[in-house]
Image (tube, coloured by chain):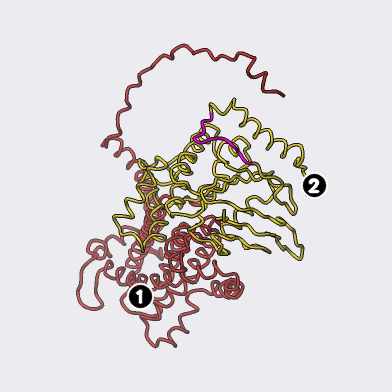
Amino acid sequence: MKAYLKLDHIDKSFARGGQVSEVLKDIRLTIDKGEFVSIIGHSGCGKSTLLNLIAGLTKVSAGAVLLEDKEVDSPGPERAVVFQNHSLLPWLTVYENINLAVSKVLGRSKNRAERHDWIMRNLDLVQMAHARDKRPAEISGGMKQRVGIARALAMEPKILLLDEPFGALDALTRAHLQDAVMDIHSRLGSTTIMITHDVDEAVLLSDRIVMMTNGPAATIGEVLHVPLARPRRRIELSSDRTFLRCREAVLKFLYERHRFVETAA
Amino acid sequence: MSIQTIEDTTVKAFPAKPAEVIAFTAKARRRIDPIVIAGKLARALVPPAIVIALMLVVWQIACSSPTASLPPPSQVWNEAYDLIAHPFFNNGPQDIGLAWRVLISLQRVAIGFGLAAVVGVALGALVGQSIWAMRGLDPVFQILRTVPPLAWLPLSLAAFRDSSPSAIFVIFITSIWPIIINTAVGVRNIPEDYRNVSRILRLNQLEFFVKIMVPAAAPYIFTGLRIGIGLSWLAIVAAEMLTGGVGIGFFIWDAWNSSRLPDIIVALAYIGVTGFCLDRLVAAVGAFVTRGTPAK
């Protein structure tokens, strides 16, 4: 099967004041269409940098990101990002935030009424249609993140990039949003890459879990297939042997083989 | 660390006793209560009224002696009654009410300040956005902004050869610096995330400016505009004293030359009230425009 997204021998280093620090080294990964892939690793291992490279927000030092065999090196709406801190524009309402994206990305292919329907459909998808006229400051953190997901989906991306999307949320809200993301993924079949540091979240949501070694010069240590049938239900899974084995495998990787050592730097 | 233990131990959560339901009486919606409003108005108006009354009394006592060089309030009231009571009379080209004169000055301020706002926001955006524009322009701005407004007047008179555009230029050059500097700070403080959003959407320069930069920097821009409008009102009065014409500034100079001190005092009151209103106006527009944007 031909790869949908291919990360081809990617290196990334940052030069600062004459000192070059190597962040990522020789990243090789292929992702199929419709796949849900999580990238997990200790903080500082460069997983957010990797997401930014795929998004095109940062340029690779060597290697290439190939989407459908074409190199991508600048950001674009076909790789929509859901940011950790939602990044909604505070002076626009929920509706206007999504409209900004929709009218820019789909302004040519859809007329006004179609765009309106499309915005409302995406708001319905994340169950936020009721808050369409609220400003970001007036809704909760979980709701903001839902709107952020709706904005990303409304761009009709080929790949959805989630940068620790639930990191700033409390555990219960986080569970709700994980269910929402699973539901959306099953309905739309969107190819998704998610950065996370939560083992349970990675196992619950992903088809594959990419485990990063510690930096500097971090690379992909192991890739774990999660052979759990969908739809997945968190309560049933909490005692499922496969789930627990996957969880154990990731934990062992993170805390035995690549234990995070706090450096003096 | 085995899974077996989970299955062996019986964990059972017992249902808690049904919680008692306490009905809250709905809080009465806030209605417009005349007594509350009257109370608020009284709190806002009574203290300044008392202070003003006290100042008038002190002034009256201090200037009552026949040798006093300045007129007491009673004399101002008597001699300048026409100006106080009829702000809108019009008896020919040089004999018009103070409100007309203020409006003429305001018109000049509107043109000069309007130009300064447009140019200032554009230059500020440039300086905030481009590191090279900042390195090149910032030192120049920092030096020019310390030049007192009236020092520009001879130069602009020489350049424009007419008093009215010169006065407008002085307004422009006085009010533009705080607008540039505040806009630049605001643009530099736009969160990286907003820039990333615009990059993912592939907004072009103009769309980024209109849809992200101006709204994001709006709290800073309005701080600059508010300082700028205050400075322009300071400068117009001084400029008009020197350029002549029919503005409020020239009126003061004219009154001084014909020793009409009470007229000057009335004109000062007009200037103060107008300046206050301008400041509040810009602040109100700013509060309206930046609603929803948290000021940082």
- Residue at numbered disc 2: A264
Q: Amino acid at mark 1?
A: Phe
Residue B109 image point, x, y percent: 37, 71
In magenta stretch: residue A233: yes
| Residue range (magenta) | A225-234
Element class at badge 1: helix
Q: CA distance from mark 2 to mark 1?
A: 70 Å
Rendered hue of chain B is red
Is residue A33 in view from this perspective? yes
Please name whichever residue, B205 or B114, is drawn nearer the observer in this view of the structure.
Answer: B205
Say which chain tag 1 marks: B
Q: Does residue A71 lie above or below A212 as drawn? A: below
| Quarter occupied by residue B36 | top left
Residue flagged by tag 2: what amino acid is it?
Answer: Ala
Residue at label 1? B250
Query: Is A169 or B231 nearer to us in this picture?
Result: A169
| Relative horizontal placement of residue A59, taking residue A169 as reference (left or right) | right
Q: Chain of mark 2?
A: A
**Residue B124 coordinates in the image, percent (x, y):** 50, 68
Q: Nearer the viewer, mark 2 or mark 1?
A: 2
- Specify whether residue A174 is painted magenta: no
**Would you say the magenta stretch is mainly helix, strand or loop?**
loop
Picture residue at 77% right of the left edge, 43% below the top: A262
- Furthest toward the right, the residue is A264
Judging by colour alone, the chain drawn in yellow in this rendered image is A
| Spot occupied by residue A19 in the image (x, y as percentages of width and height) | 77, 62
B120 horizontally vs A121: left or right: right
Which quadrant would residue A17 be assigned to in this image? Answer: bottom right
